[in-house]
Every structure is written in structure tokens, then in C-alpha cells.
């Protein structure tokens, strides 16, 4: 008799609710010729000079494992980069870890800091991996509701109200996926104060750091007295259009990095050497190609925010990442209904806000990392759709 | 602001003042005014398309002509350059540093036509000391656009 596999998977894994929008995904797969505003990655290919550096490295025989922490040259470049951009000092030999994307960075962080039952406070809605990584590491995610009225910023007071004796850390990510929200230095400083008052770690996912429009990005670790207790996660995926390379980094206190590296060395060994070589090139001379992409995103951002408001989907002016997060409440539909109907009737894909947490209800995520022509066509189809379904 | 507007137009000359207005957050009538002015003072020279003529089987012959010139007192290369660029066959004319002086891009229907232009019009100009003609064999990239085999971006339909 064969073994019944059902029920043999980990309870911890089973605890992660299957994505509520599975049906939406199935539907998506069945429809051809859609315009998608649902793709959370750049529509540019990696700048050629970065690709070329990687190709050259392969020709030169760079095909081996690297140090667990990552290639020394990459850590040095990164250290210089963090110094130049934020005046932050991170020791390349003990305070930086090259990861397989911010994705791995998030997982390592949670496994490195959490004991069973530890709580991690984070905004709702937020990037899908945040709560999953906490749960997989044996912790409990504690959600802080955010809303359009406050531009989807998380408030320090709301965080503090949820601190218990089990709270271990605050996890934030600004500029934010799915909302495009950016937080000011002053408001982040208030969060830093809460963290200090309660001796909490702060994990700051700054993968969209370079994608800000008309405002400055504040690196959390630059706030007063907070660097030692901040775990800064950064990446190359979005700023340099390198999603498929799978490369990112963590910068933190050396105890934390050592713990993360302990897991990393046994589970990942090291990030791919080809991606590391590409990352060196990105840091050395990727600035101008990245700036060009940011300029283009900004034009699209203004077009989509204006366009959504014009068709009656009220939308705050998001200042970061490449997402607009309009309200669809005027249609009387749930986010999921809206996304499904829009897909079927107009062949436009947006992501229901509920994919990112309960507080995403009433909103959909529209990613503008797609051509202006597609954005305008999508807006015109959505306009027709909203008109047809508007509740008077 | 004008630079931002010009960049948008250089990339797609069909972008309307209204679209540019949205993209830049500048009032539409102001955008229109800036564009008008740029057209008037010839900052914007003309609006054109980049066409792959081979697709419609309409091949033009292109040649790059290196021209060696004896510079003239007071006007340097300018007056000879002018005598060359006045010919409509000369599509682009540049003064260069290096082993020759002027680079002239010439287009014609046939190789003969181009060769005739060089030998009968260009070379005899007073002050032109010599020419070298390079016929163009293949166009790979034109004004930043790759003609064949442009890469396609293939993405998953939704990424969270
Ligand atoms: C907020 C946020 N963090 C992390 C990631 C994952 O990034 P990486 O490609 O570096 O793993 C994403 C990707 O969408 C994201 O939106």
C-alpha cells in the first residue's frame, strides 16, 4: 500500500492561507491578449552594460561558488555605495551579506531573529512575502491597518498600540508595494522612536529606494541612533531591471549578519556568481541607466494617476515604486469582483488589493511598469468599464 | 521644462500637448506654447519617422563620403561645407576631426546616381582636395532603433 501523502506536509506551511485570489490567477491564465497592469517588475531588460559584464565573466570562467557572504569586490562596492548615497558605514567583511534577492533577505532575517510566537508588526496592505516569511519562521504577523486617507502610510502611534511583550520587530517597506506610498523622514523618525522605546528591531525593505518621484527617499538606517538595530534589505531587481538575476543584499549589525549567514551558508551557500558580477557593474556604473528608467516611470506615473482619477477611480498621488492603488469603491464591487470582471469584459489585468491584505479591499493595484501606449489603452478600457458599472 | 518636453517629443513626435501636459504636470496651453516657440526658433527642426524601407522593397543607396578640404581664409570650412550641403542629395553633413574634414551622407536611387553626384558635383568643388566613398551595405541600428531582431520582453501576466 502506498503512503498517503495528504496530511504529511508541515503544519507550519499549511498555516499559510492559500492566496485568496487563486481563482483570479486561474482565470488570468485562460485569457489571451490581455493588457496587464499586474506585473510588478520593470518592462525594461537589464541595461546592456550590465548584461555584457556578466557575459564577459562567463567567458572568463567565473563559474564557481563565491564566499558565503558574497564576492569581496561586490561587498566593497556596496559598502562604498551605501556610504556615497546615505553616508552609512557598513563593514564589507562583517556587516553586509549578498542574498538571492530581497526575497531571501526577508526569509533569512525572519529565521535569524524570531523565536516561536514572536510578533512582527507590519502594515496592511503590504508585499505578499512579509507575513508568509514571518509565519514560516515560527512568528506571528501583526497587521496595522493603513488607508487611502493617510496615503497608506503606517503611523507610529498605531504601531505602538500593538506592541506586546512578544513583539520582536517592525517590518516596513517604503516605497511600498502595492500602494506606491513613500514615508517622510519625520514620520519614519517617529517609528524609529517607537522601536527604541520598546527595544525592537526594524526590518526596512528598501528595494524601491531609487524609484521615487519628486521626493527624497529616506533610508531608515540613517535616522538617529537606529542603524545598529535596523536590518536594511536592498536589491537590484527594480532599480536596475534585474528581477530574473535573483540578487540583493542585507546590511545590518554584525551579530545579525552572522546569524543570517549561518542559515544562508547551509541553505543557499552563495548567490549566483554571474548575478554578483552583474551587480558589481550595476553599482559601479548603473546610475545613469537607472536614472533614465526613473524618468520614464515618472511620466507614466503622472499619466496613470491622472487617468485613474479622471475615470472616477480616486487615487492618491503615489510617489514611489511603480504602483498606483486606486479606490474602486464607487463601483460597489469587491476588489476581486472588479479585477475578474475587468479581465473578462475588457481584457485588462489589475491585481485585487486583497492579495496584499484585508485592508487592500476596495482597491486594485495598477502597475505602470508598462508602455505608455498600453497604459493609455488600459485607462480607456477601464473608463468604459467604470462607466458601465458605476453605482449612482 | 523645455528639455523634458523635447525629450518626450524626440522619443515620440506624435505625443500630444495634452499627453505631455499630464506626463509633466505642466498646463496644456503652456506646453503648446513652448512647442510653438521651439518650432518657430528651429529648436525643433522637423517631425519625422524612422522607417525600414527594405520592408516595402524600396531600397535606397546610401554612401558615406569622406571629403578632404583646404580651409579658406576667414571662413575656414564653412563655405565649402555650405556649397556641399546645399545639394539635396547630401542628407547630412558634418565637420570632423581626424584624417579628413567633412563627412557627407548621400542617398540616391542607384549606385550610379550616387557615384555621379560625387564625381560630377562634389569632387569638382573648389577647395575639395579628395574624396573617399563608402557605400553602405547594411543597416543594423538607426537612431537608437535596432532594425531586425529587436529583443522582446517576455513577462509573466501577473507578478505580485
Ligand atoms: C516590496 C518588495 N520586496 C521584495 C521583493 C522581491 O525582490 P527580489 O527580486 O529582490 O527578491 C519585491 C518584488 O516584487 C517587492 O515588491
Image (cartoon, coloured by chain):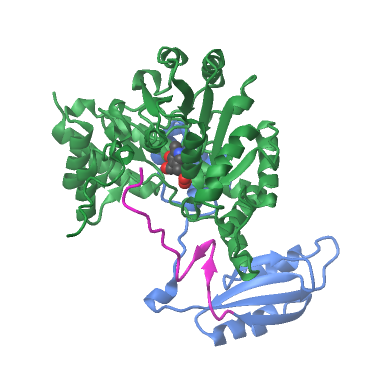
Residue nearest the viewer, comparing A383 with A118: A118
Residue nearest the viewer, comparing A231 with B24: A231
Residue nearest the viewer, comparing B128 with A248: A248
Q: Is residue A172 left or right of residue B107?
A: left
**Which range of residues does the magenta coloring cover?**
B136-160
Q: Is the N terminus of chain A in the top left, top right, bottom left or bottom right quadrant? A: bottom left
Q: Colour of chain B?
A: blue
Q: Is the C terminus of chain A in the top left, top right, bottom left or bottom right quadrant? A: top left
Residue sitting at 53 percent across and 68 percent down?
Answer: B141
Residue A346 in the image: state x and y as whole percent: 20, 46
Which chain gets the green colouring?
A
Q: Is residue B52 left or right of residue B68?
A: left
Q: Is residue A379 left or right of residue A97?
A: left
Say which quarter of the image contains residue A117: top left
Residue sitting at 33 percent across and 36 percent down?
Answer: A365
Q: Is residue A279 magenta?
A: no
Residue A375 in the image: state x and y as whole percent: 34, 44
Amino acid at each position: 500500500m502506498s503512503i498517503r501523502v495528504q496530511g504529511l506536509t508541515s503544519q507550519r506551511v499549511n498555516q499559510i492561507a492559500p492566496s485568496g485570489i487563486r481563482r483570479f490567477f486561474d482565470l488570468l491564465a485562460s485569457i489571451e491578449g490581455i493588457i496587464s497592469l499586474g506585473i510588478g517588475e520593470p518592462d525594461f531588460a537589464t541595461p546592456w552594460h550590465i548584461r555584457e559584464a556578466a557575459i564577459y565573466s562567463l567567458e572568463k570562467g567565473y563559474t564557481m561558488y563565491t564566499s558565503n557572504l558574497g564576492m569581496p569586490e561586490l561587498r566593497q562596492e556596496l559598502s562604498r555605495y551605501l556610504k556615497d548615497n546615505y553616508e552609512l558605514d557598513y563593514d564589507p567583511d562583517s556587516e553586509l551579506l549578498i542574498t538571492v534577492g530581497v526575497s531571501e533577505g526577508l526569509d533569512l532575517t525572519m529565521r535569524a531573529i524570531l523565536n516561536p510566537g514572536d510578533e512582527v508588526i507590519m502594515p496592511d496592505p503590504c508585499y505578499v512575502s512579509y507575513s508568509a516569511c514571518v509565519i514560516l519562521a515560527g512568528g506571528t504577523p501583526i497587521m496595522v491597518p493603513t488607508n487611502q486617507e493617510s496615503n497608506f502610510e503606517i503611523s507610529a502611534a498605531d504601531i505602538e498600540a500593538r506592541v506586546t511583550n512578544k513583539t520582536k520587530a517592525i517590518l516596513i517597506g517604503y516605497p511600498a508595494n502595492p500602494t506606491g506610498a513613500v514615508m517622510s523622514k519625520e514620520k519614519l523618525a517617529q517609528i524609529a522612536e517607537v522601536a527604541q522605546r520598546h527595544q525592537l528591531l526594524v526590518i526596512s525593505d528598501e528595494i524601491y529606494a531609487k524609484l521615487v518621484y519628486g521626493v527624497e527617499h529616506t533610508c531608515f538606517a540613517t535616522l538617529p541612533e537606529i542603524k545598529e538595530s535596523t536590518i536594511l534589505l536592498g536589491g537590484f531587481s527594480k532599480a536596475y531591471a534585474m528581477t530574473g538575476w535573483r540578487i540583493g543584499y542585507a546590511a545590518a549589525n554584525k551579530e545579525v549578519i552572522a546569524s543570517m549567514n549561518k542559515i544562508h551558508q547551509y541553505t543557499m551557500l552563495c548567490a549566483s556568481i554571474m548575478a554578483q558580477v552583474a551587480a558589481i557593474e550595476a553599482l559601479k556604473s548603473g546610475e545613469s541607466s537607472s536614472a533614465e528608467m526613473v524618468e520614464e516611470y515618472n511620466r507614466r506615473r503622472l499619466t496613470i494617476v491622472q487617468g485613474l482619477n479622471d475615470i472616477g477611480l480616486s487615487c492618491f498621488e503615489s510617489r514611489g515604486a511603480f504602483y498606483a492603488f486606486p479606490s474602486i469603491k464607487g463601483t460597489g464591487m469587491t476588489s476581486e469582483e472588479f479585477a475578474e470582471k475587468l479581465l473578462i469584459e475588457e481584457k485588462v489585468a489589475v491585481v485585487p488589493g486583497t492579495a496584499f491584505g484585508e485592508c487592500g479591499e476596495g482597491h486594485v493595484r495598477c502597475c505602470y511598469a508598462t508602455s505608455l501606449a498600453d497604459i493609455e489603452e488600459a485607462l480607456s478600457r477601464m473608463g468604459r468599464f467604470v462607466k458601465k458599472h458605476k453605482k449612482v | 521644462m523645455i528639455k523634458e518636453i523635447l525629450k518626450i517629443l524626440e522619443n515620440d513626435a506624435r505625443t500630444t500637448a495634452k499627453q505631455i501636459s499630464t506626463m509633466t504636470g505642466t498646463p496644456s496651453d503652456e506646453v503648446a506654447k513652448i512647442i510653438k516657440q521651439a518650432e518657430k526658433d528651429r529648436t525643433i527642426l522637423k517631425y519625422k519617422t524612422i522607417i525600414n524601407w527594405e520592408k516595402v522593397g524600396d531600397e535606397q543607396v546610401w554612401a558615406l563620403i569622406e571629403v578632404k578640404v583646404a580651409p579658406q581664409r576667414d571662413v575656414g570650412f564653412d563655405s565649402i561645407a555650405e556649397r556641399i550641403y546645399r545639394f539635396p542629395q547630401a542628407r547630412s553633413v558634418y565637420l570632423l576631426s581626424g584624417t579628413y574634414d567633412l563627412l557627407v551622407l548621400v542617398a540616391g536611387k542607384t549606385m550610379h546616381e550616387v557615384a555621379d553626384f560625387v564625381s560630377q558635383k562634389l569632387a569638382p568643388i573648389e577647395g575639395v582636395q579628395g574624396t573617399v566613398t563608402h557605400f553602405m551595405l547594411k543597416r543594423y541600428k538607426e537612431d537608437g532603433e535596432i532594425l531586425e531582431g529587436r529583443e522582446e520582453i517576455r513577462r509573466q501576466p501577473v507578478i505580485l
